[in-house]
Image (cartoon, rainbow, N blue to C red):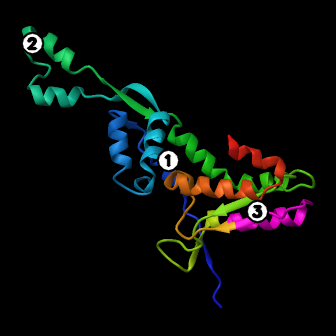
Amino acid sequence: GSRERLFSPTLAGAAARRREAFASRAAALATFASKPPMRGFHPGALAAYVEHGFVDDFLADNQTTRAETHTGMGPSSASGREGRRTKETKPSRGVRLALCRDDEALIFANGAAETEALRTVCASGAVSCPVTIARGSTRASHDATMIPYPAFVAAVVVETLNTHTRRETATRLETRGGWDHFAPVADPGGFAERVWNHIDRAPVSYTHLRAH
């Protein structure tokens, strides 16, 4: 049969083009909720992302030119109106991404380093607890003949763990077709359910966690 192709978008480039500043958290929330991928997030998760993923920035939304245009006040305004012009053109307090886009782009650009991290995790004796790796659909939404990179690498992690570690319980791979790699924030309830299912299958020493 035909061999699946790997879909791995250039995330570093996308991150480098991200909009960093907004007039307010409300403005950021409205923007993110209007387009993919974040419009697919659970409302509570998206609100938390906006609340904690931004920092206050007094210069994020400089309204000087806009205020001058709306009030008809430019450099030639009468001195008696200058005080009002200065007050109206003061930069408003906006917000900016806590993780700047350049730093995010660097993280994605160095993603190949995960190969070395995988070797460390899968070293003999490194992992002794039960492990479940959850992944979303193995079909890219835009092309069913392609497999998204997160779904692909999940299977690689499971195979590597089961090959190089000695544990009583083999690492399990769970696939949920309606998910993608944003599942924890898109379907937090469903994701939490899968976590509890994993705990229920674990040795007795772990099951007390459900009580809390």
Label 3: how many Cα within 10 Å (few below 14, some 14–19, many 20+):
some
Which quarter shows the C terminus?
top right
198 displayed left or right of 4: right
Q: Circle 3 — which element?
A: helix
211 displayed left or right of 184: right
Q: Position of residue 45 (x, y in %)?
A: 48, 45
Q: Circle 2 — which element?
A: helix
Residue at image point 73% right, 52% down: 113
Region in magenta: 152-173
**Circle nearer the N terminus (3, 1):** 1
Q: Position of residue 57 (x, y in %)?
A: 41, 26
From mark 3 to mark 2, how far is it between C-alphas?
67 Å
Q: Position of residue 11 (x, y in %)?
A: 55, 55
Q: Which residue is mark 3?
A: 157
Three-letter code for the amino acid on which mark 3 is drawn: Val
- Above or below, 171 against 211 in this view is below
**Circle nearer the N terminus (3, 2):** 2
- Above or below, 84 against 168 in this view is above
Three-letter code for the amino acid on which mark 2 is drawn: Arg
Q: Which numbered tag is attached to residue 16?
A: 1
Residue at image point 79% right, 48% down: 206
159 displayed left or right of 70: right
Label 1: how many Cα within 10 Å (few below 14, some 14–19, many 20+):
some
Q: Which residue is mark 2?
A: 81
